[in-house]
Image (spheres, rainbow, N blue to C red):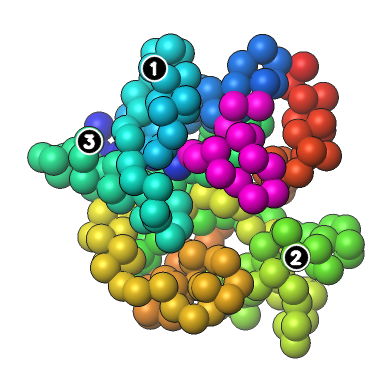
Amino acid sequence: MENLIVIPARLESSRLPNKPLAQIADLPMIVHVMNRAVESKCGDVIVATPNQEIFDIINTHNGIAVMTKFSHESGSDRIFEALEKYDQDEKYEKIINLQGDLPTINPSLINQTCNLLEENLDADISTLCSPIFDNKEFENPNIVKAYIKNPLKPTYANDFVRMPGSYSYDKLYHHLGIYGYKRSSLKKFISTNQSAREKDCKLEQLRALDNDMKIVIDFINDIPIGVDTEDDLYNVRKELE
């Protein structure tokens, strides 16, 4: 297959430590995410992790894990190290970065991200977002928003923010943490230094925009729960159990 889905996962989350191993319906969360990726049939699947515990869990559940170093600045930096180790023959042309905290993601969204990259050859990166229906989300810094000046297709992100600032609410969309990369674009991304905005906002996608990379976006109706807090974990357990 020419596509590789890489799931970065680590135990050192500041908001919810050890969350990849959190039990949901008798399986660790990272295994649920891996299973959704496999179900997509979009490409081969690996987990990129610096933690032996995650490595062992993935192997126990018949998956493939690649050990990475601890000191990565972002998830994309981690998946690139795993890609270089796993695919030394460079057979994969498109790389999907699937966050390890999306255990309820619909596998079709993984395919949608990949197809978006295939349909927009001038794009470096693809991702997904949804309209915001609850005004409380606009003022929640844990919900990342894509700012889009022109929603006509093909649609490109102009910015990503945690708080609206001066941006009009009707041009902000709830961003889902999944990215499709051309292999060459991922290599370019990794070769550039973190931008000041990326460091300040803790949003790796700002590094891409600040280095003139094009991020194409498609719209979806519902955002799957991203597990960042105990409340998120409770809601995901309710949904899957």
- The x and y percentages for residue 95 are 34, 46
Residue pictured at 41% horizontal, 73% vertical:
194
Mark 2 secondary-structure assignment: loop
Would you say residue 185 is visible in this rendering? no
Question: What residue range appears in magenta?
Answer: 9-22
Question: Label 3: which residue?
Answer: 86
Question: Is 191 rendered above or below residue 212?
Answer: above
* Secondary structure at numbered mark 3: helix
Give whichever of discs 2 and 3 has the lower sequence position: 3
Count of labels in the image: 3
Residue 64 part of the magenta-drawn span: no
| Label 1: element kind | helix
> Which of the two discs, 2 and 1, labels the residue nearer the N terminus?
1
* Amino acid of disc 3: Tyr
Quarter of the image for residue 188 reads bottom left
Label 1 sits on residue = 59
Q: Position of residue 4 (x, y in %)?
A: 32, 38
Q: Position of residue 134 (x, y in %)?
A: 88, 58
